Amino acid sequence: MAKQVPSAPRSVRGSRSGRPIMALLDLLGRRWTLRIVWELRESTLTSRALRTACDEASPTILQTRLSELREAGFVELTDDGYRLTGLGRELFQTFTPLNRFAERWSKQVG
């Protein structure tokens, strides 16, 4: 069973409060984390396919991030590879408005 994201009073990197939003932002701010969630948005991928999709990220860091995402309940390992859990799909859906904003923003500044 996946562990829950740290909450108060447990502290997380960059926050003494341990508030859930701080714990989530800490996790999502780690290198390759968002990219992994993005690449798993539509399908289940093996470790190798995920590494290829992530521009040949270091296998060590990729496995570390996958372990963290599994512990947080966002990713699961199946017989076919890694995929987002229901919670992971919900997390991804929260990115949709941010992605639309980023697209508009890049057109304005680029």
Image (cartoon, rainbow, N blue to C red):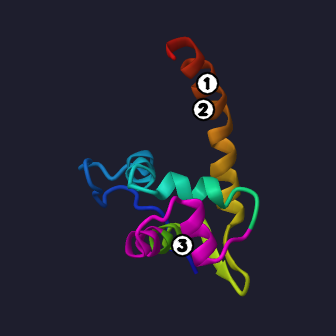
Q: Position of residue 56 (x, y in %)?
A: 49, 65
Contact, CB < 8 Å: mark 2 with mark 1?
yes
Q: Is residue 71 magenta?
A: no
* Nearer to the camera, 91 or 49: 49
What residue does disc 1 label?
Answer: 101
Quarter of the image that includes the N terminus:
bottom right
Q: At numbered mark 3, what does the secondary structure look like: helix, strand or loop?
A: helix
Q: Residues within 10 Å of mark 3 (few under 14, many from 20)?
A: many
The quadrant holding residue 96 is top right
Contact, CB < 8 Å: mark 3 with mark 1?
no
Residue 98 - label: 2
Q: Residues within 10 Å of mark 1 (few under 14, many from 20)?
A: few
What residue does disc 3 label?
Answer: 70
Q: Residues within 10 Å of mark 2 (few under 14, many from 20)?
A: few
Judged by its main secondary structure, the magenta piece is: helix
Query: How many angstroms separate mark 2 from mark 1 (CA)?
Result: 5 Å
Query: How many angstroms separate mark 3 from mark 1 (CA)?
Result: 28 Å
Q: At numbered mark 1, what does the secondary structure look like: helix, strand or loop?
A: helix
Q: Please tell me which of labels 3 and 1 falls first in the chain.
A: 3
Image point (44%, 46%), residue name:
21
